[in-house]
Amino acid sequence: MIDRFAIIRLILLLSLAATPAMADGWRPYANARFGYVIDLPADFTVAGEADNGDGMTLASKDGKAELRVFGANRLQDDFAAEIRSRREMDEKDGWTIGYSKSSKTWASYSGTSRDRILYVRAISLCHDAVGYVTLEYPKAALKEYDAVVGHLVKTLAAPPRCG
């Protein structure tokens, strides 16, 4: 006969062994077409997937935040020019960009429009492609989404090797 306390200890041990992403309310996502990976908030639901396999759109439980993860082939000559072009498109769409930082392999910017915040993170991918994560959410939820943005930035990654 199995000891009840042994079963309880086993259940507790297994629950502690869960991956950090799962334990912290995150789930891993790997894009087959472009090869990027990222952790997605577990409480966001898929609102749509691209037919061409480049990514997806997710919505927060309350429907007030939208998260997009996608890859795209560069339309500009280099990564920096691609990011400038995308930022200009966002500005034309009414976003006032207040923060921008970049390197040769990544770029981030954020802006506001009325009562909304937009955060964009991009990374250079293989074969002249770019991986993006964008999060749009209410200004009133800034503190709530700061940690989400931080985790998205930390986990968005290009493939280790180009094939």
Image (cartoon, rainbow, N blue to C red):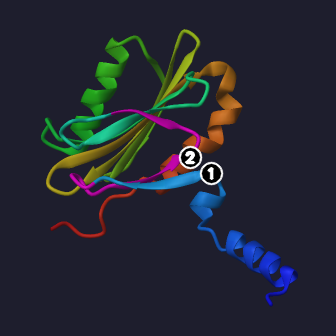
Which residue is at 43% across, 16% downward?
A: 95
Give the mark nearest the N terminus, 1 or 2: 1
Instruction: Give the image quarter of residue 115.
Output: top right
Residue 118: x and y in percent read 48, 26
Proximity of marks 1 and 2: CB atoms separated by less than 8 Å: yes
Which residue is at 55% across, 17% downward?
A: 116
Query: Where the N terminus falls, by quadrant?
Result: bottom right
> Label 1, label 2: how many angstroms apart (C-alpha)?
5 Å
Q: Is residue 7 left or right of residue 74?
A: right
Label 1: few (<14), some or many (≥20) within 10 Å?
few
Label disc, if present, on residue 25 of the rendered structure: 1
Instruction: Give the image quarter of residue 15.
Output: bottom right
Which residue is at 29% across, 28% downward?
A: 86
The answer to if 19 sits in the magenta stretch is no
Give the amino acid type for the residue marked by disc 2 in the picture: Ala
Give the amino acid type for the residue marked by disc 1 in the picture: Gly
Query: Where the C terminus falls, by quadrant?
Result: bottom left
Q: Is residue 8 left or right of residue 44?
A: right
Pointer 2: what residue? 42
SS of the residue under disc 1: loop
Q: With respect to residue 88, does 59 lie above or below?
A: below
Residue 123: x and y in percent read 33, 49
Q: Is residue 15 left or right of residue 151?
A: right
Q: With respect to residue 154, does 13 lie above or below?
A: below
Residue 60: x and y in percent read 56, 31
Q: Is residue 1 left or right of residue 111?
A: right
User: What segment carries the magenta color?
Assistant: 32-48
